[in-house]
Image (cartoon, coloured by chain):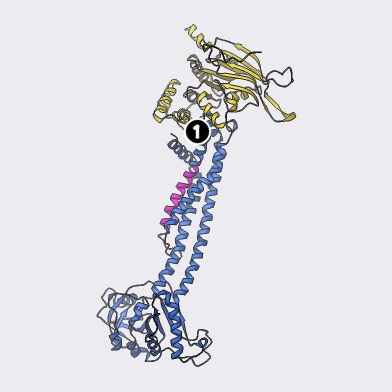
Chain colours: A blue, B yellow
């Protein structure tokens, strides 16, 4: 009989105090929704970190001039990085750790197309290896080639933002733009990466190194040398290799006096990722506490309900209701509260996760939805069991006398 | 000294209620209050306890002022409370040794309650109220509905089956309670001041209903302090200070209840 009957009584009991039931459910709802949402925010932020690691380029190491210790600015012996350094790294025969090398010069200038003038965030002169190392993919058109570099051809690949600014909806490939007085033919447009920081990585013009040196910087030192390690496991070996080769070309005996530094951005970001994990755990803990508070709300309201309905319990016992039926009835009621509350909480959490929160796009963890729902239901059972037990163990005579 | 009557011929059925040396006291030591004590034991000087037999088909009114122990007796007879000492056999079953689970079974199968304050369950239709004891007994839905409707028809409320307690008058509520009490066909109908909260017209209706039930063989124990109500019974017990001081038979056990009989004679 009894399952359906019990469920009907439980629904009736909840419906008798609609506001009270709704408020209790609200407690569970907030708990469940906050567990789902806060974990999604934490997950979203670590996802964002992961994405920016891959967008930086896989296994890339950046070599730039200057002392790692930062104290060598006083000494005048700082040697700039040159194309020769890059060539030394690239031609280092016994290195299997280094996959490719690209010297980079960065400058700025104004680009003209027809009567449109726009200053891109940066103008980069480099080798084709740069594209793979920096994880820049062409969406349309093609990369420039080693031949273009050797021939100092005036070709350029535009970042998505720059292309949009100069050409709007027009197809830039094959068009000529003027950069610092030199006409360049656009051969490709890069995929948009989307920026997470202050600078827009898509606001860029990339051209062959000698062409940019010719037009802007002159054939002096380069700003950076971008090195791609053969794999993620060899980044440390590659770093050692770079140090060895550059100490040689710069004729420095003491490694602590190196006039260049190597940054491994991926490892920095890995550290940041572990920070976001801690952050996620903390958010989860706060959410779990609010779920617990919701559970205590259930106990509270069920105790009130049991007290209120003591007489009814007495009548039922006089009519021969076994202990288990009374227990079941109140447990069903509290579980129903938590199930409905948790269900609405899941809905609220999933809806909430469609909005970005403090700049982070939440990514819902499926386990957190199931987990939060399951825990909420378990909380309903657990926190409902005390009041239900109290109701079931009332002596019928006392319950009937209750006013 | 009376002997235990186990070996009697089946022509004398087991009494519905048999209590022996039953006492009920509250509190401890000097503060002990004997709600049920019976006469003093000539040997020990303490309470000897109440003894009582109620035959099947009898209609007993228990009278007494407040504090006389009649409510205590009613609670013990209804298995809502346990006696301090003594034996209580309900329909041949010694209920003194039963645990809570078994007691709830006994209440469900053997006893139908009618209370002074109706004690219907709020927000529940009359039909569902009457079905409830059957549901606890594990009767199937269709059978339950059929029997509940039959019980409601018997008390003349079939057309009000879908009404909730707050949509029924006091008299109607008490009739629903009677229907609920008799739907399981219990051995004993226990009514605690069933007319205490009713006007005179509803009182007549409810008492006529109980008279009719007794006429069809149902054993009835009725607690009251009104002589008007007690006149409906075949036997009247009077309690004073936890003792039965008076036991008057007004009509034979196997005849119709006196009021119904009178009505027939007048007609």
B173, B32: nearer the viewer: B32
Where's the N terminus of chain A, which quadrant? Answer: top left
The residue at which mark 1 appears reads as B122
Q: Can residue A195 be seen in this view?
A: no
Residue drawn where x is 45% and y is 81% of the image: A239
Quadrant of residue B50 within the rendered picture: top right
Residue A371 highlighted magenta (yes or no): no
Relative vertical location of residue A141 with respect to residue B182 in this rendering, above or below: below
Q: Return the x and y of residue A18 as percentages of the image width and height.
A: 48, 43
Residue drawn where x is 58% and y is 35% of the image: A394
Q: Return the x and y of residue B90 as percentages of the image width and height.
A: 56, 21
A57, A141: nearer the viewer: A57
Residue A342 highlighted magenta (yes or no): yes
Q: Return the x and y of residue A352 as percentages of the image width and height.
A: 43, 58
Quadrant of residue B249 within the rendered picture: top right
- Kindly state the secondary structure of the residue where label 1 is placed: loop
Please indicate whether residue A399 sits to the left or right of residue A266 in the image: right
Quadrant of residue A106 within the rendered picture: bottom left
- Residue at far front of view: A94
A27, B95: nearer the viewer: B95
Question: Which residues, given as a range, are shown in magenta?
Answer: A333-362
Relative vertical location of residue A243 with respect to residue B164 in this rendering, above or below: below
Where's the C terminus of chain A, which quadrant? Answer: top right
Chain of the residue displaying label 1: B
Q: Is residue A345 visible?
A: yes
Please indicate whether residue A390 sits to the left or right of residue A355 in the image: right
């Amino acid at each position: 009989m009894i399952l359906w009957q019990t469920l009907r009584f439980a629904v009736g009991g909840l419906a008798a105090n609609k506001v009270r039931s709704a408020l209790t459910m609200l407690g569970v709802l907030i708990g469940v929704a906050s567990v789902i949402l806060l974990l999604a925010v934490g997950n979203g932020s670590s996802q964002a970190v992961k994405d920016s690691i891959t967008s930086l380029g896989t296994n890339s190491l950046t070599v730039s001039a200057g002392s790692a210790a930062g104290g060598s600015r006083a000494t005048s012996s700082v040697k700039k990085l040159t194309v020769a350094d890059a060539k030394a790294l690239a031609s280092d025969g016994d290195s299997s750790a280094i996959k490719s090398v690209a010297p980079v010069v960065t400058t700025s200038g104004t680009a003209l197309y027809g009567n449109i003038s726009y200053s891109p965030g940066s103008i980069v002169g480099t080798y084709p290896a740069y594209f793979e190392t920096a994880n820049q993919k062409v969406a349309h058109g093609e990369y420039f080639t080693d031949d273009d570099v050797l021939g100092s051809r005036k070709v350029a690949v535009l970042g998505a933002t720059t292309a949009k600014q100069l050409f709007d909806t027009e197809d830039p490939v094959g068009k000529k733009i003027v950069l610092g007085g030199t006409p360049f033919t656009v051969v490709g447009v890069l995929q948009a990466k989307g920026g997470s920081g202050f600078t827009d990585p898509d606001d860029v013009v990339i051209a062959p190194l000698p062409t940019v040196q010719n037009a802007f910087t002159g054939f002096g030192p380069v700003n950076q040398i971008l090195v791609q390690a053969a794999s993620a496991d060899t980044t440390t070996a590659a770093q050692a290799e770079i140090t060895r080769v550059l100490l040689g070309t710069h004729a420095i005996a003491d490694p602590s006096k190196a006039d260049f530094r190597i940054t491994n951005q991926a490892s920095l970001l890995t550290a940041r990722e572990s920070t976001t994990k801690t952050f996620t755990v903390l958010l989860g803990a706060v959410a779990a506490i609010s779920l617990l508070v919701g559970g205590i709300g259930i106990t509270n309201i069920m105790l009130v309900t049991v007290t209120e309905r003591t007489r009814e319990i007495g009548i039922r016992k006089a009519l021969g209701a076994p202990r288990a039926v009374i227990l079941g009835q109140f447990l069903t009621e509290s579980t129903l509260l938590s199930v409905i509350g948790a269900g609405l909480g899941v809905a609220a959490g999933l809806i909430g996760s469609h909005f970005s929160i403090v700049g982070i796009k939440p990514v819902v963890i499926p386990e957190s939805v199931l987990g939060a729902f399951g825990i909420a239901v378990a909380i309903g059972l657990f926190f409902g069991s005390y009041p239900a037990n109290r109701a079931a163990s009332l002596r019928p005579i006392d319950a009937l006398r209750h006013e | 000294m009376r002997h235990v009557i186990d070996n009697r011929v089946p022509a004398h059925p087991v009494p519905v209620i048999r209590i022996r040396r039953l006492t009920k006291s509250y509190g401890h030591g000097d503060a002990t209050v004997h709600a049920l004590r019976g006469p003093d034991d000539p040997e020990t000087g303490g309470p000897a306890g109440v003894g009582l037999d109620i035959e099947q088909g009898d209609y007993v009114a228990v009278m007494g002022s407040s504090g006389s122990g009649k409510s205590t007796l009613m609670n013990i007879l209804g298995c809502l409370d346990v006696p301090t000492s003594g034996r209580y056999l309900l329909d041949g079953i010694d209920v003194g040794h039963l645990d809570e689970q078994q007691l709830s079974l006994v209440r469900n199968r053997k006893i139908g309650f009618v209370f002074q304050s109706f004690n219907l369950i709020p927000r529940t239709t009359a039909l569902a109220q009457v079905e409830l004891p059957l549901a606890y007994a594990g009767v199937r839905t269709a059978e339950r509905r059929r029997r509940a409707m039959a019980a409601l028809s018997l008390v003349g409320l079939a057309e009000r089956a879908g009404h909730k307690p707050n949509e029924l008058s006091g008299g109607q509520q008490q009739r629903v309670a009677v229907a609920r009490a008799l739907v399981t066909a219990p051995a004993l109908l226990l009514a605690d001041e069933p007319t205490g909260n009713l006007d005179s017209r509803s009182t007549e209706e409810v008492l006529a209903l109980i008279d009719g039930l007794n006429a069809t063989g149902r054993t009835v124990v009725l607690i009251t302090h009104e002589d008007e109500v007690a006149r409906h019974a075949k036997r009247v017990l009077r309690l004073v200070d936890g003792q039965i001081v008076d036991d008057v038979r007004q009509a034979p056990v196997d005849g119709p209840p006196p009021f119904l009989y009178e009505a027939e004679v007048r007609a």
